Amino acid sequence: MLTLKQLREQPQFVIDRLAVKNFDAKEILEKITNLDQIRRETQTELDSLLSSQNNMAKEIGSLMKEGRKSEADEAKRAVAELKEKSKELDEKMAKAVSEMNDLLVLLPNLPHKSVPTGKTAEDNIIVREGGIIPELNNSIPHWELAKKYDIIDFDLGVKITGAGFPVYKGKGARIQRALISYFLDRNTKAGYTEVMPPHMVNEASGFGTGQLPDKGEQMYFVGLDNFYLIPTAEVPVTNIYRDVILNNTELPVKVTAYTPCFRREAGSYGKDVRGLNRLHQFDKVEIVQIANPDSSYESLEEMVKHVEGIVQSLELPYRILRLCGGDMSFTSALTYDFEVYSAAQQRWLEVSSVSNFEAYQANRLKLRYRDEDGKTQLAHTLNGSSLALPRILAALLENNQCEKGIKIPAVLREYTGFDYID
């Protein structure tokens, strides 16, 4: 959430930067400014009234001691009127604050100065590419490979739950577990502390990381208990630090977690959602950092290089994109997407997003750190997929098909216990 200080001091800058995200903030900003003015003027009037009440209370005591009861009674009536007026002002201020907060959460995060302008994924910038795109003869897509080798049953998932909930079987289940263990081991070796968070969160947690209210319709809601199934481990992991003040010496905090993820993906259909391309439930390993604002972009580059190293180790052709304003998330200030090439589908598949949210989430979370002068400041939060499994697995299956079956990358063999799916 943007701070009132930002909006007061740099209103035109906020409007101009949000225009990069194709968001017109002018009307909302004007309403917030007016409500903030009402709040501040009301607070000034209320402070004056409270001061008068205190002075009159002292005067009443003096009048009573002097035996001037009628004057004291008159003063008491005046105090009662002031209290009633103060109550009205309290209600007026609370209403202004409530309406202002309702508008503040409608404003996206400001994009970083390096974010390119653009409206769709076509306007994203390729930062770099790596790996070699395999040349395969008679390659088949992963959903057919899954059936051929009996490793993923999409129809059984439909029977048990519905579309988008596959059942992994045999070596398909084993490679899922292998990928999760491998990703977690890479992350912990890089200094991330592993946690196992809940898979459901409350409304405050959803609000803290920005899924609510913006993405509420994409989350599965457990109405009886007012919980939400998590769309990513980012939500519970980052909320570990909600209402926390860290010491500057503790930064950066680095945490990793594996969780299943649940997304409704309302409106998704067509060839691009076949097989593992888009699921309602999928597995993902996440990395999260809490950083000092002065070094958060160094942390972002470190996270990008870390994810890149994992993708390289899987021997997958990849590219890294800097997202344009129109393709960025509501909460992000700067995002890099990783895509791997699917040889059978002959297209790029997104497998990771690595983002810096600057202080946007921290303001919602009330996540702060104490600087060298002892003052509390908002921290910066970052997160990245390290990695999401479905499309990684899709690319591994498609790119590594050969006469002997599906070849397992060397780094995974000690985790899978086999060299081929056959």
Image (tube, rainbow, N blue to C red):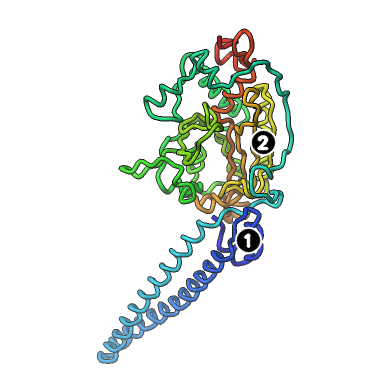
Residue type at numbered disc 2: Val
Residue located beneath label 2 in the image: 304
Secondary-structure class at tag 1: helix
Residue 176 coordinates in the image, percent (x, y): 52, 21
Q: State left or right for residue 168 relative to residue 159.
A: right
Residue sitting at x 50%, y 36%: 269
Residue located beneath label 1 in the image: 14
- Front: mark 2 or 1: 1
Residue extending furthest toward the top: 404
Q: Residues within 10 Å of mark 2 (few under 14, many from 20)?
A: many
The answer to whether residue 349 shows anywhere in this view is yes
* Sooner in the amino-acid sequence: mark 2 or mark 1: 1
Q: Residues within 10 Å of mark 1 (few under 14, many from 20)?
A: many
Q: Where 311 sits versus 114, above or below?
A: above
Residue type at numbered disc 1: Val
Is 183 in front, or is 44? Answer: 183
Is 379 in front, or is 124? Answer: 124
Residue 152 coordinates in the image, percent (x, y): 48, 19
- Locate the C terminus and report the quarter of the image it occupies: top right
Secondary-structure class at tag 2: helix
Residue 185 coordinates in the image, percent (x, y): 58, 24
